[in-house]
């Protein structure tokens, strides 16, 4: 399988320990998501992460729910954050936020409060239902699984790529 072109979103199963939050989460939302994910048996809505830094752009609560379920991977759309494919705005008016500050906060651990940033992508990203079994077993913790950005069916072909 060939990697996606630069600037093209790429569906990946990312090791959870590589993900970097830039916002705190609300406990009630996480608890609700844990039960919802357990009930569904699939993870339908991939998170969004920045290529290279693995900063979570969308999905902080879903990642925390997966952690509490002891998942080792999270389904993610990997995006080129520095390009105009991803836009950033604050949830509250008047709060100036930059992409560089989002990354800095994620890397330093100085998290924003919940729902501070709002990321949008230029085109809609499809749902990628991922069986929970794919998130809990298998590969070494450092492996990253990539799939095609156009869904071929219920599961993309996997190929390991070191960090």
Image (cartoon, rainbow, N blue to C red):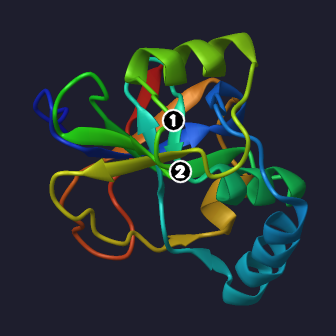
Q: Secondary structure at mark 2?
A: loop
Q: Residue 37 location in percent, x, y?
A: 72, 77
As drawn, is 8 to the left or to the right of 44?
left
Tell me the quarter of the picture where residue 159 sits. Answer: top left
| Above or below: residue 114 compared with residue 21 | below
Tell me the quarter of the picture where residue 146 sits. Answer: top left
As drawn, is 131 to the left or to the right of 30?
left
At x 18% / y 40%, what residue is drawn?
Answer: 85
| Above or below: residue 74 compared with residue 26 | above
Query: Dot 1: few (<14), some (14–19), or many (≥20) neighbours within 10 Å?
Result: few
Q: Residue 163 location in percent, x, y?
A: 50, 17
Question: Which residue is tagged 1?
Answer: 95
At x 68% / y 38%, what residue is drawn?
Answer: 23
Tell me the quarter of the picture where residue 18 sits. Answer: top right
Residue 45 in sight from this viewpoint: yes
| Above or below: residue 144 compared with residue 161 | below
Q: Residue 109 location in percent, x, y?
A: 75, 18
Q: Secondary structure at mark 1?
A: loop
Residue 163 in sight from this viewpoint: no
Query: Dot 2: few (<14), some (14–19), or many (≥20) neighbours within 10 Å?
Result: few
Pick the front one: 45 or 115: 115
At x 26% / y 22%, what residue is drawn?
Answer: 82
Residue reaching furthest to the left: 5
Residue reaching furthest to the front: 94
Total labels: the figure holds 2
In the picture, the disc for residue 56 is none
Label 1 with label 2: CB-CB less than 8 Å: yes
| Above or below: residue 108 compared with residue 70 | above
Question: Which residue is tagged 2?
Answer: 92
Task: State the CA–CA distance, disc 1 to disc 2.
Answer: 6 Å
Q: Residue 77 location in percent, x, y?
A: 38, 48
């Amino acid at each position: 399988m060939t990697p996606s072109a630069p600037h093209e979103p790429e569906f990946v199963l990312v090791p959870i320990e590589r993900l970097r939050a830039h916002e705190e989460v609300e406990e009630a939302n996480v608890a609700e998501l844990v039960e919802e994910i357990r009930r569904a048996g699939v993870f339908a809505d991939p998170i969004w992460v920045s290529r290279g830094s693995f900063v979570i752009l969308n999905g902080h609560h879903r990642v925390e729910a997966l952690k509490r379920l002891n998942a080792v991977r999270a389904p993610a759309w990997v995006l080129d954050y520095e390009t105009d494919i991803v836009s950033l705005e604050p949830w509250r008016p008047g709060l100036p936020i930059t992409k560089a500050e989002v990354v800095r906060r994620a890397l330093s651990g100085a998290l924003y409060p919940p729902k501070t940033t709002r990321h949008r992508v230029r085109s809609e990203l499809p749902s990628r239902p991922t069986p929970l079994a794919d998130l809990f077993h298998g590969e070494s913790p450092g492996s990253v699984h990539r799939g095609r950005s156009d869904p071929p069916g219920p599961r993309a072909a996997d190929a390991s790529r070191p960090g």
